[in-house]
Amino acid sequence: MTILEAMVLLTELYPSLAQVQPAPDAPDSGLNPFDVPANTVLFSENAACQGFPLVLSGEIKVSRNSGDGRSLELYRVVPGELCLVSSACLFRVQPLSAFGITTKPSTLMLIGPDLFKRWLETPAFRNDVLGLFAERMADLTALIDAVAFQKLDRRLAAALLGRGQQLLITHQTLADELGTVREIITRLLRRFEREGWVSLGREQIQIINGAALRALVSTQPV
């Protein structure tokens, strides 16, 4: 992707940037697109924030680590969306509270801290960032509810649904998404298999009875 193509795409995905100064394509903005492969760590938990990522293509998964090596996915950033963790870090000048990793080949631009602060002086961009806080807070509240109040078997059933009949996914990946350990996920999947809901293979899961999984998801907590 050329710089010109990237700048056109940038303003299409993030319309509020058409009003910021300096403009994204101004020489003193220092913005250039860069490509990263899948599974690239873009920022690390407790590290200083190097800038604010804008996603032109691909996807960033943002997660938190636990003390025992597990991780919990907080949200994902796709083209046209903004990263809450990065903005919070830049607002308060404190270390990052989570880590971000690309889930697929991605093209990004990184806004430096000084440029980010200058752009915040533009009402349209500032409103986008503040709107992001509201949206992500709703997402994180739903995540907290799921972790705190829903049983893991219901959360696992929900994670399996909506991915098609044949899932090419490992037990470890599901464990990472749900913030638990692989052994528990394996135990639950084997229970699902005994019930006739799924069929397990090497790094794949076939949905046999989606209606049963949906019924489990819809049951109310005791």
Image (spheres, grey):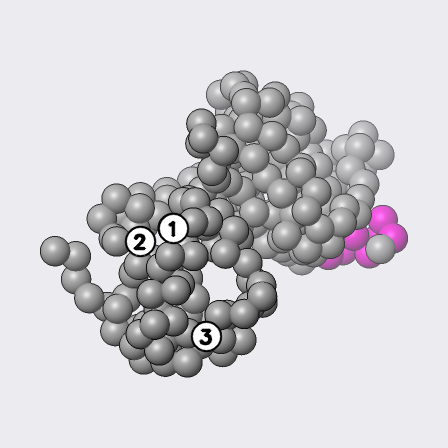
**In front of the other: 75 or 189:** 189
Say which amino acid is labelled 2: Leu
**In front of the other: 192 or 152:** 192
**In front of the other: 177 or 105:** 177
Q: Position of residue 15 (x, y in %)?
A: 62, 52
Distance between the alpha carbons at the discs numbered 1 and 2: 9 Å
**In front of the other: 114 or 104:** 104
Say which amino acid is labelled 3: Ser
The answer to whether residue 151 is left or right of residue 193 is left
> Residue at the right extreme?
2
Asked if one can make out residue 160 in the rendered structure from this viewpoint, the answer is yes
Residue at position x 55%, y 58% in the image: 170
Distance between the alpha carbons at the discs numbered 3 and 1: 17 Å
Q: Secondary structure at mark 1?
A: helix
Q: Secondary structure at mark 2?
A: helix
Which quarter of the figure has residue 96?
Answer: top right
Say which amino acid is labelled 1: Ile
Residue at position x 76%, y 49% in the image: 37
The circle on residue 135 is none
Question: Where does the magenta region start and end?
Answer: 2-9
Asked if one can make out residue 120 in the rendered structure from this viewpoint, the answer is no
Q: Quadrant of the C terminus?
A: bottom left
Question: CB atoms at circles 1 and 2 under 8 Å apart?
Answer: yes
Residue placed under numbered mark 2 in the picture = 152
